[in-house]
Image: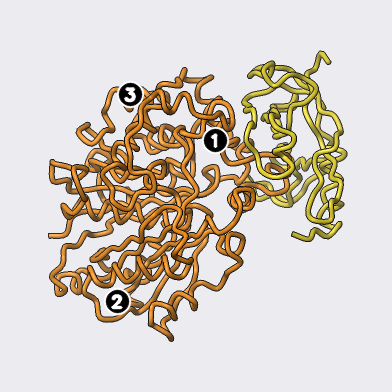
Amino acid sequence: MREVCVVGVGMSQWGEIWRRSLRQLFVDAASDAIKSSGVDHLDGLYVGCMSSGLFVGQEHLGALMADYLGMRGLPACRVESACASGGMAVRSAFFEVASGASDIVMAAGVEKMTDCSGDDATYALATAADQEYEVFNGATFPGLYAMMAHAHMDRYGTTREMLSAVSVKNHKNGSMNPVAQYPFAITRETVENSVMVADPLRIMDCSPITDGAAAVIVTTEEIAKKLGKPYVKIIGSGVGTDTIQLCQRDDMTTIKAATIAFEKALKMSGKKLDDITFTEVHDCFTIAEIVVLESIGKYQPGEAGKAIVAGETALDGSFPVNTSGGLKSKGHPVGATGVAQVVEVYKQLTGQAEGDRQLKNSPKVGMAQNMGGSGASSVVHIMEVGS
Amino acid sequence: MTMFSSRNWREYPQRYRLEASKFKKSGKTYFPPRDVDPETGDTEKETVILPDTGKIITYTVIRVAPGQWGDMSPYGLAVAELTDGTRLMAQVTDCDVEEIKIGMEVRIEFRRIQTESHEGVLSYGYKFVPKWY
């Protein structure tokens, strides 16, 4: 396989973006990525999107987006793995370049979630769970993660304070991210006085509904060098899956798909866990950040919550997590999230993170962990600074 | 969305009668029924009926929910492990939501679940009720 690099990135504004449509959000991010990379053409396009069909009644995004980007004829298709669609688009582009089939491929992600009612959006999101045996019985996504949270609290003594610490930290980081949907700091009291959605998760434990897009240009190291722009290498890509139904997993306090994805990506990268000094993780709910950090083996089961409260995962901690603000503060346009995580790792590794959220220790290796459903699929990418 | 009745009646054996698949090679039971044993790849199986009692191993109380579920909230939702070790997710009913806790013993009962799709198809299935009830 050839060495694969990310050489340019782009993001649209994230939030409730009434003036921009699904295709316009994509074009905002994609044009940005092309411009920042300096590439003069693309050989292929993957669009990560979970459910444009249910959110705005539009499928067939490959052709649509290629056309509106001004690239009719470009080989393009949509990639779907629920909320892990973006990570899966990056992985598809990675392998297309690694295999030698193409030299310059765009991986993008987009979701337009506020053109429909909250009920319709909740319905669309719930299709990532088992329609006939979870959703049929009244399960919602906050409900599924709430059941993981109760199981985790029961087994390890995980506390309300630990969940709140995730939200407070991510909002603090997101307050320095210019494209974030909710770029403001919050207090523990704000989280703990917010509306209960599904016990024990409150609204401030939940990532929001967001419009947004993100894009990255994936290419060879040779081309990246020629372009003369900052670049990072994708040195590991891994995917794992598990039962779509939460209750069919032997252990509901861990996410096996994330463990599998991480181990595969780590093996490909040739690195050790401790070589990775920061990560973006899929904090769709506060409990998810705790469970994922344990599932990848960074913390022993039951220890991640304590580490977060102790500040270990803060910007100035030993292992910063979700420097972008995470899904909680930056927003969660489901299909775009996995691509935006790669954008953040790229920015941190190339010293381009905006404001004070740029890590001070010149990090060399970072990671992005993206997840679908209640953890039925996960994609992990490990990236390293280019020479 | 329009829902053809076939999508509903196809699920009757498991939703109405708790039919599950027990595979010959592993002796493991899966609910809902499957064609392939995920552990052994075995396809030889028999249909068994799940026991109707178990205990809650995790739960939540849904307080914000979409559509018709919003009219029912707050409602309890739980995963119970049945006496044969199989697990399933269902609503917890016939008790105050504040009474639901991990370790609570429940019985499975046949109940109306929801009014599905634009056609308003009445859909039935199973719910958990406290064992003492």
- Secondary element under disc 3, as helix, strand or loop, is helix
Q: Are marks 1 and 3 in contact (CB under 8 Å)?
A: no
Q: Amino acid at mark 1?
A: Tyr
Quadrant showing the C terminus of chain B: top right
Q: Are dots 2 and 3 in contact, CB under 8 Å? A: no
Label 3 sits on residue = A309
| The color chain B is rendered in | yellow
Q: Earlier in the sequence, mark 1 or mark 3?
A: 1
Give the SS element for disc 2: loop
| Residue type (three-letter) at the residue carrying disc 2 | Asp
Nearest the eye: A384 or A185:
A185
Q: Counting other residues with Cα less than 10 Å from the Cα at mark 2, is it few (<14), some (14-19), or many (20 or more)?
A: many
Name the residue rendered at 21%, 53% in the picture: A384
Q: Chain of mark 2?
A: A
Residue B74 image-quadrant placement: top right
Q: Subunit of mark 3? A: A
How packed mark 1 is, by other alpha carbons closer than 10 Å (few <14, some 14-19, many 20 or more), is: many
Which label is found at residue A19?
Answer: none
Chain rendered orange = A
x and y, in percent, of residue B56 in the image = 68, 23
Q: Which mark is residue A145?
A: 1
Whole-Å distance between the Cαs marked 1 and 3?
20 Å
Q: Quadrant of residue A235?
A: bottom left
Residue A269 on image: x %, y %: 28, 52
- Indicate left or right for B8 with B88 as reference: right
Chain for disc number 1:
A
Foreground label between 2 and 1 = 1
Asked if one can make out residue B90 in the rendered structure from this viewpoint, the answer is yes
Residue A263 visible, this angle = no
Q: Residue at 41% across / 82% down in the picture?
A: A74
